[in-house]
Image (cartoon, coloured by chain):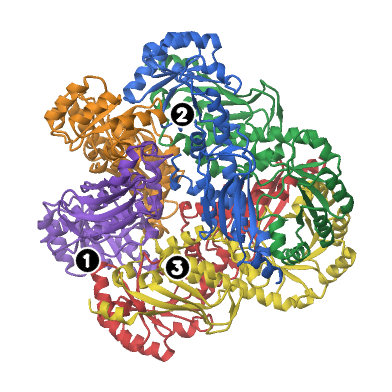
Chain colours: A orange, B purple, C blue, D green, E yellow, F red
């Protein structure tokens, strides 16, 4: 999996540390000697697909650039319960301060990757699994990366990088033909996706030359008919109420894409922990203080 | 539910809008006339507990201070499927631009409140349900507010506002008595919580005078024995692997608190949508362009 | 011209004011009474196409929300020398503080719009004029808006919202066919643009199914041959060394697009000024201090 | 040329990268293997004066601190077409991501330096060439540095670091003598510059003891007369409508300074490019994937 | 006293509120009903000179734009103990949240103004009292404003807006004449201040044509001799170890300026408080909850 | 003294440098050759307790990561006049640019530590000395650290990490018993501090079970009576008008804590300076330019 550029997560990592650390870790400040050192291992506690390992490493580096972080896995890898993901070493205080924030990123993103992988596996290569804009606010770039780690494919990132003409746009523009024509004029060369909520709209979208037609909450029968009519003249995206259970049936309809909001808005966190081992020499010394 | 101060979410709202809008909404820019106006209603699509309504309102205000937002519900209210939550009116383009970001906040936070309410209801007043620091990074203040909306109680916000002496702190400080004594010295007047992973540690924590003892992953039998030994000399928090199913049994043990990471790291989004209705006059005019 | 959303320029306006005002306007602080009021008119001093009027208005509002700004023109309008663009009224000190920053935005952006309009007029509808990523750093969203105001069309905003496979990408991916295939796999549904530096590469790009082929610094004869070979199977973009003089000849070749870096990296500022008229009553009073 | 302190451009470099990279480079992400390495050379494509080389180097370092950047030129140096400016080496993906942003800074700033040098050469040492506050918003510190690189001299940076009493200040303060007296009182020890739009105002400014008198849009005859009257009692700045053609004549009038807005608001970009050479071994390997 | 432009303190006010409020006021959240309203009066508890009243008002407005703030005093006014400074009215919770941050600004800045006024009064018009760059970090613009409120005069704001050639600069440049000549060349038209630590250096600075000579830690006898030698050819600033006690003697020496670091680094806070009166009706209602 | 985590001061250091450096150090830019190097020593000029040494070191590192900073003292150490605190070496220009900002932090924070130490010494171990929220805005985390360096103890950091029920909260909640009960309900496990302004309120606070009772501006006789009544059922904090002179008498009353606003709002700066020694070889060379 191609790594993210650090420029894409530096600021959010900094804000996350600040949120947890605030004016200082009062427990660690009192109890952990500045010279105490420790090693640690990042462990999968249940099977999962990894995402966010670089982000987690960056949390440790931001708290203390002296922490070593040696990963034995990469984003996109599947882990079984008990697998070691990375070895760490450094100042004990720094490891304790960074631990929860690093895990919060890694568990959330690996949760998305793991759920995505379940949908992609259920699709069995017969339909492409897309994400949506239904992401936890301010974490979208990371969430989209996690979807890729799970084998999913990204729909547009935001309002700025893809055209999607929805029902209200259609009405304001005076119908699908007018909307597509005007859009083509102002944004030549970009593919146009049109949301269709009925077979009549599907036919209009075909005539207007839409590159992608989104079937929004149609019945299975309507979707079958729609895909027949489209007949390869446009790509087809199925949207709305897609669950793991329904995915095999949807995949069989012959559409190109299925988009699933739950990948990014409802994925449970992956179970990953950090096991810290104190340097015994140091522990002895500090105990004797 | 006491509202949050806007100073606590202004920046994250601004970043969330920026993330979605980026260099501009290319669809709306092309198709929605600047003068088009619309009304909209925020609707619960399944039963839920609301959280984040002020944040959602702020998203609309930040995009366009001319949007009216009249709420008929408040944070902490339970909604049935179909309940109207708020009425909106303003420029159609602004409503379309703000819609998804506002919903992303509201659905995520109401998801947390709804899950929390299920735990609190299962506790039936016999044990206090606490959240943890296992939150989605940079959204913690909002997540903690959502927990309160669901009837839950906040544990410490971060490393800065509560003392929690964990296993590594104990070892570095030379045992529970030394750790508590040093902590008391440096932070007089603050309650000290000690994590105990065995009955022996429970006894040490009692002797050291800890105000709260966290029973971390003890068996039910050990927990019963621990609570017997503590006998009101400290408050007791149960932590680790707490599910809705196990909650009634845990509540019966006589502990004061149970902390649940899942409230904030694994709550599925609540199902809430925005139904936009265009001003018909305007629609006619714009269609005729 | 559809206006920009203020969320897209609020921060840069704030930084621009800060840059000019710094720790305070020492001249105005000493000489302008807080109660002095003035009116002003924004005037075109030579013919131009307007861009950035909302940004300029926002500068005044940010300095002092009490300033009135009544525009009689809109972005995209052509102005003759002497045309009044807007009337302003408010505190004299605020007008003096905001003046230069507001003009700097308006003159720079209108300069881009004016130059773009000259290229678009020279194209005479036979070829679409595109901008590039060669913009003044941190002002790209505004520059792209100015290009639209001048009748130009935006190429991708950045690395994130459009695929452009250049020579180095081709070599690293092992040739045009491999590059396009891999790209198609990872970003299904997005148009792929391939840079071709020879007729052989043009043929490869056609076979690979590229949606757009960029002819980069080919001779006129080569471009004619390339467009013949492409024969409508892909859109064609001409790039490199495009001047106003050469544009009519290039437009006659039959390509779809021509991209021009100079629109945004070398446009001279438009000549626009602010004429301030002090309130005579106030002037009398303040003179008598 | 004394280099800028990095504290002066770190933030704008970060914002510029973010603007171009946004949520990620979709082309490079798909096609460039993480392990691919390359070398590159920064080349002048036409004669120019360099400015912004440190800023460009900082762009590369910010994207990837592992990139080597070895400059063979310095800010202020003149380059002929074909001159190598710097050698780079590092990860191919990082070079591709940073390339355009680095060039945008370097071309814009070197454009300013090159134009400034032309004015300074035309002045032939007989008059000092000053810049103005007419700069591209938020880039002023860099623009002023570029002016120095071209041999020009900086006027005040902003409203905060120099006194310039203009016509409206004069009227609000009740005339030139009152304005200068009040200014002197509040800001003792700072030189006072007064704008004079007529010979009468020139005489008033002399009497008031202004250190600098700006002749604003006077005719050549009026300027000659003004300089005669001033006779060394103040320094003289010529302002308004200064072109390269008129500069020799203006320089002969005997004024001290001429200020030129075009240096920073209308300088065309310098022609500089980055030629990237992939590591052949790597290329072979990656092609074989 | 001319007010500061809000653009100069908006960000620091926002950060100050955030610092105190953090993730929320847990006491007010629990105890103050959202509908409770209150009035309040800002009171001087000892005699002082006011500075920062607009900043304090802005704190309240930033917390809650519905708070009314009616000032009966202005920055620069002297207050006796017991004087009312402003009347406030609004939501009780908002007043309680903003109170301490507003007072912290007002007390610190009024402390500076009050101490400055004591120095200015001691100078009795015979010498101008200057501040220095010895300010509390990040509050300099406000501190310099407070000095003006106390009747003091601002020295340069920072390294960017005034030339001060100190001993190390002199040595690196090869002596005072070389330093002044080079400085004059690069920054024509700006006054040059030279630090002199001996009578020999005073003579050099006179010959070099320095506009201001700073006598740094000279004895009174040396200062007398220095001022004799300078004889009006430059202005004279006394610096180093200036106390209120010594000021009358120093003022008698005939120098122009005395600079005092203590004004901004060691001024004790002014004693100002906010007396809040709850709306009795509301109190009754809330008590009955 | 446990050091602060750099995440807690990075941003304020950056803003402080920016504030002083602005668009550049015009004196150093002109006179200090880029290649000139220097050593320096940080010196105590009067006896003091150090605080902020890491922050000062960070200022130098932020300006120029090539500066060496070798400290021979640590935060919390007492210095006599003349003690060397740290040795520095690096580029002369960087040392000159960073000097004042670094000293401003170090002198302010060491001033707080020094004053705190005087109070703590006067308390002679009989009462704990607490700070307050009366800090210079935006510097609170640093100020609280400085208090610890001086041997003081931190009260709550802000509104978010400690409960303090003041007079207005009491009235709005309907009396002390109701306020404490409601607070206990919403924030179980946190100690509750109640402000008492009379003996009657003291008795109410005892009955309500407050963990800490703040005696606010009671007479000495009232305080004695209050402490008698409390008799160990709560801890006691004395607040209001505490001076060094009164401290021994207050310490004898038997209270647990005394809180002193002056520690952070009125501490005079410590006298610390940086003595820079230029590299003689370099000096010779640069003098010869």
- Residue at the disc numbered 1: B235
Q: Quadrant of residue E207?
A: bottom right
Q: Which mark is residue E60?
A: 3
Which numbered mark, 3 or 1, is in the foreground of this view?
3
Quadrant of the rendering where the N terminus of chain D is positioned: top right
Q: Is residue F100 above or below residue A243?
A: below
Quadrant of residue F210 within the rendered picture: bottom left
Asked if residue B135 is positioned above or below residue E3 in the image, the reply reads: above
For marks 2 and 1, give the one nearer the viewer.
Answer: 2
Q: Where's residue E132, x and y in %?
A: 68, 63
Q: Position of residue E214 (x, y in %)?
A: 78, 62
Q: Is residue A288 visible?
A: no
Q: Report the Cα–Cα distance between label 3 and label 2.
A: 46 Å
The residue pinned by badge 2 equals: C155
Report if the CB atoms under discs 2 and 1 are less than 8 Å apart. Answer: no
Label 3: chain letter: E
Q: Residue at x 29, y 53 (%)?
A: B88
**For this rendering, which residue is in front, F205 or E65?**
E65
Secondary-structure class at tag 3? helix
Q: Name above or below for residue A223 compared with residue D188.
A: above
Is D171 left or right of A30, judged from the image as shown? right
Q: Residue A212 vs residue E179: left or right?
A: left
Q: Residues within 10 Å of mark 3 (few under 14, many from 20)?
A: many
Q: Are marks 3 and 2 on the same chain?
A: no
Res. D267 visible in picture: yes
Q: Which chain is indicated by disc 1?
A: B
Q: Tally the marks.
A: 3
Indicate the position of residue D87 as horizontal and vertical percent values: 60, 25
């Amino acid at each position: 999996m191609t790594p993210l550029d650090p420029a894409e997560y530096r600021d959010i990592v900094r804000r996350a540390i600040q949120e947890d650390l605030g004016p200082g870790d009062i427990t660690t400040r009192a109890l952990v000697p500045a010279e105490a050192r420790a090693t640690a291992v990042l462990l999968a506690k249940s099977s999962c697909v990894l995402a966010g390992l670089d982000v987690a490493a960056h949390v440790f580096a931001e708290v203390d650039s002296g922490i070593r972080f040696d990963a034995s896995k990469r984003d996109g890898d599947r882990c079984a319960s008990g697998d070691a993901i990375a070895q760490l070493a450094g100042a004990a205080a720094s490891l304790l301060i960074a631990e929860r924030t690093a895990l919060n990123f890694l568990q959330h993103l690996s949760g998305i990757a793991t759920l995505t992988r379940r949908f992609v596996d259920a699709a069995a290569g017969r339909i492409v699994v897309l994400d949506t804009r239904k992401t936890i606010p301010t974490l979208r770039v990371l969430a989209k990366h996690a979807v890729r780690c799970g084998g999913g494919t990204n729909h547009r990132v935001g309002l700025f990088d893809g055209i999607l003409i929805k029902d209200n746009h259609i009405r304001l523009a005076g119908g699908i033909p007018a909307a597509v024509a005007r859009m083509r004029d102002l944004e030549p060369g970009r593919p146009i996706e049109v949301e269709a909520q009925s077979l009549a709209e599907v036919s209009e979208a075909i005539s207007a030359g839409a590159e992608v037609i989104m079937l929004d909450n149609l019945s299975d029968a309507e979707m079958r008919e729609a895909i027949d009519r489209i007949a390869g003249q446009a790509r087809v995206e199925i949207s709305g109420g897609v669950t793991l259970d329904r995915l095999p049936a949807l995949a069989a309809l012959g559409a190109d894409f299925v988009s699933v909001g739950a990948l990014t808005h409802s994925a449970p966190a992956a179970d990953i922990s950090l096991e810290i081992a104190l340097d015994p020499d140091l522990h002895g010394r500090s105990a004797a203080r």
